Amino acid sequence: MALVLRPIAPADAPAAGRICHSAFKAIAEQHNFPPDFPDPDTAIGLMRQLSGNPGCYGVVAEQDGRVVGSNFIDERAPIIGLGPITVDPAAQNQGVGAALMTHMLDRAARNGAPGVRLLQSGYHTRSLSLYTKLGFAVREPIANLQGPPLALTVPGCIVRAATAADAASCDRLCRAVHGHDRSGDLRKAVAGGAASVVERHGRITGYTTAIAFFGHAVAETNDDLKALIGAAPVFGGPGFLLPSRNTELFRWCLQHDLRVVQPLTLMTVGLYNEPAGAYLPSILF
Ligand SMILES: CC(C)(COP(=O)(O)OP(=O)(O)OC[C@H]1O[C@@H](n2cnc3c(N)ncnc32)[C@H](O)[C@@H]1OP(=O)(O)O)[C@@H](O)C(=O)NCCC(=O)NCCS
């Protein structure tokens, strides 16, 4: 059956969202993990949001005029964020995923992007193999953490809502830690009232777009991240993502009754700077 790839349109959101929900649910249930999306409507909502976002590029795969999968990239930052990629469980293991991935990698290369990053479900052998074959390298084991809000403060750290005036300092911090900024995502979170900064001695030493599955955080030290995590009213979605090699912060979270929901793997192709500070990655960007 000929496979056709074309840019996603908002009208594709219901079909792509149903597949996104069922593909993640099927693989999660096979391994006794909770699904990433609680119901089809949540996944359809995300497809709608991504397909209408001018900073993102989405594509659907069609077989005989029927949508069988989709994939997205965020092109707002120099390092491209990839995902979610999903293929209809009935059409998996036939090369659709490889076609959806190759399409995005070709586009990133054509546009001169220095690198692409993604978060891989750590228990999924197929995606791990597929991404590795396509050039991605394993960079970091990640723990997805969830639990009740900690409602605590860290001495010397003041957490407050981020404003547009903070954005340049946050970008500088992100560049110092990651070698690139995530200004598009940051500015959207500031405008939506979701972003926070942490200050020590009147200086911004960390920020987060949200301590959540879809949020990222960057900080000078683990104490700054603890202050941001401690002030979060909720850990959005299935919870936030923590590099598990950051043993001190990981152990602190566990000592504060947070639980590991699932393992993930940060994978990249192209430019990757070993982070020079504390950080929490986002599932997408
Ligand atoms: C991950 C996903 C998008 C891949 O799509 P797909 O169409 O099934 O993948 P493809 O058939 O193109 O490629 C799978 C490749 O992995 C290989 N593979 C599968 N299981 C493997 C294993 N255990 N060890 C080694 N290789 C394996 C296959 O042989 C194939 O490679 P080949 O074409 O060179 O033979 C799809 O399975 C999916 O939607 N999964 C659920 C949602 C999900 O996990 N999304 C990704 C989140 S990180």
Image (cartoon, grey):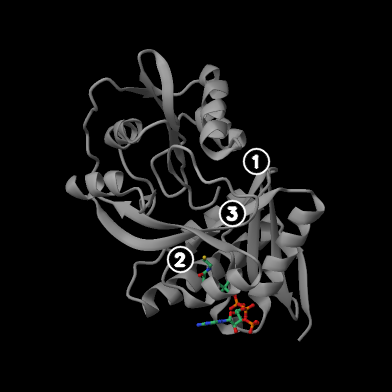
SS category of the residue bearing label 1: loop
Q: Earlier in the sequence, mark 2 or mark 1?
A: 1
Q: Residues within 10 Å of mark 1 (few under 14, many from 20)?
A: some
**Residue bearing the label numbered 2:** 121
Q: Residues within 10 Å of mark 2 (few under 14, many from 20)?
A: many
Q: Closer to the camera, 157 or 92?
A: 157
Residue 279 position (above or below residue 9): above
**Residue bearing the label numbered 1:** 77
Residue 7 visible (yes or no):
no
Q: Closer to the camera, 11 or 43?
A: 43
Is residue 34 toward the left or the right of residue 69 in the image? Answer: left
**Residue bearing the label numbered 3:** 117
Q: State the CA–CA distance, disc 3 to disc 2.
A: 13 Å
SS category of the residue bearing label 3: strand
Residue 87 position (above or below residue 159): below
Label 2, ligand 1: CB separation under 8 Å = yes
Q: Amino acid at mark 3?
A: Arg
Where does the image place residue 276, in percent across and percent down from the top left?
Answer: 48, 38
Please identify the quarter of the rendering in which residue 222 is found: top left
Please identify the quarter of the rendering in which residue 217 is found: top left
The residue under the point 61% across, 65% down is: 16
